[in-house]
Image (tube, helix red, strand yellow):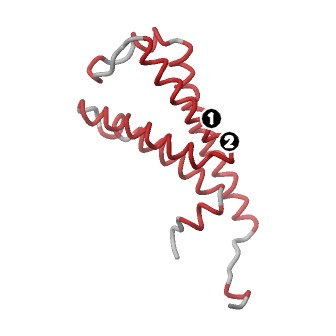
Amino acid sequence: MSSAAIVEPAPQASRLKHWTGHALSGIAILFLALDAGGKLAMPRTMAAYSPPQLGWPTDVGTFLMLGATLLVCTLLYAIPRTAVLGAVLLTAYLGGAVATHVRVGSPLFSHILFGVYLGLFVWGGLWLRDARLRAIFPLIR
């Protein structure tokens, strides 16, 4: 195989992918960390304003557990060496949020798909900033 057959992206395009990936990941990390922080710092307030129709217990312990789980997953995602593990765990967490909203018949685009939107930011950001992930999951061959 000749070296002419391998097409490298232009440095400018590669740099743009890298920084766009960091921006998407940063937005996801910021939102998820704020959500986790709210659940950990103000569990009584979060429980008081949680819609009862979601079916989750509104006790402080539940919100502390959800906040701690989300914080650990988000921290794993924020660390480059464990980012893929964090993305997988965040996908599971967000899947639970989607399932909860489907179960209670929440509005599609604003509630049900919000977890999907966040998941796209998580995986899209990681895909754009990690060439190894792009090699495993190419958009085109």
For the point 28% across and 22% down, which residue is it? 55
- Which residue sits at x=69%, y=52%? 19
Residue under circle 2?
79
Is residue 87 positioned above or below 75 on the image?
below
Give the image location of residue 135, x and y in percent.
Answer: 59, 68
Instruction: Count residues near mark 1 (Cα–Cα under 10 Å), then give few for <14, some for 14-19, many for 20+.
Output: some
Amino acid type for the residue under numbered disc 2: Ile
The location of residue 25, given as percent across then percent down, is: 61, 44
Q: Is residue 100 above or below residue 128?
A: above
**x, y (%) of residue 130?**
65, 57
Compared with 138, 58 (above or below) is above
Which mark is on residue 46?
A: none
Give the quarter of the figure containing the N terminus.
bottom right
Q: Residues within 10 Å of mark 2 (few under 14, many from 20)?
A: few
Please give the count of numbered marks on the rendered protein. 2
The residue that appears at 58% across and 49% down in the rendered structure is 84
Q: Specify the quadrant of the image occupied by residue 61.
A: top left
Q: CA distance from mark 2 to mark 1?
A: 6 Å
Residue tagged 1 = 75
Residue 1 against residue 133 in the figure, above or below: below
Q: Residue furthest bottom?
A: 2
Image side of residue 98 versus residue 133, left or right = left
Q: Is residue 5 left or right of residue 54?
A: right
Residue drawn 73% across and 59% down? 15
Q: Are marks 2 and 1 in contact (CB under 8 Å)?
A: yes
- Hey, which quadrant is residue 30 in on the image? top right
Q: Secondary structure at mark 1?
A: helix
Percent from the top left, x then y, of residue 57? 33, 17
The amino acid sitting under disc 1 is Leu
Which residue is situated farthest in the right direction here? Answer: 11
Callout 2 secondary element: loop
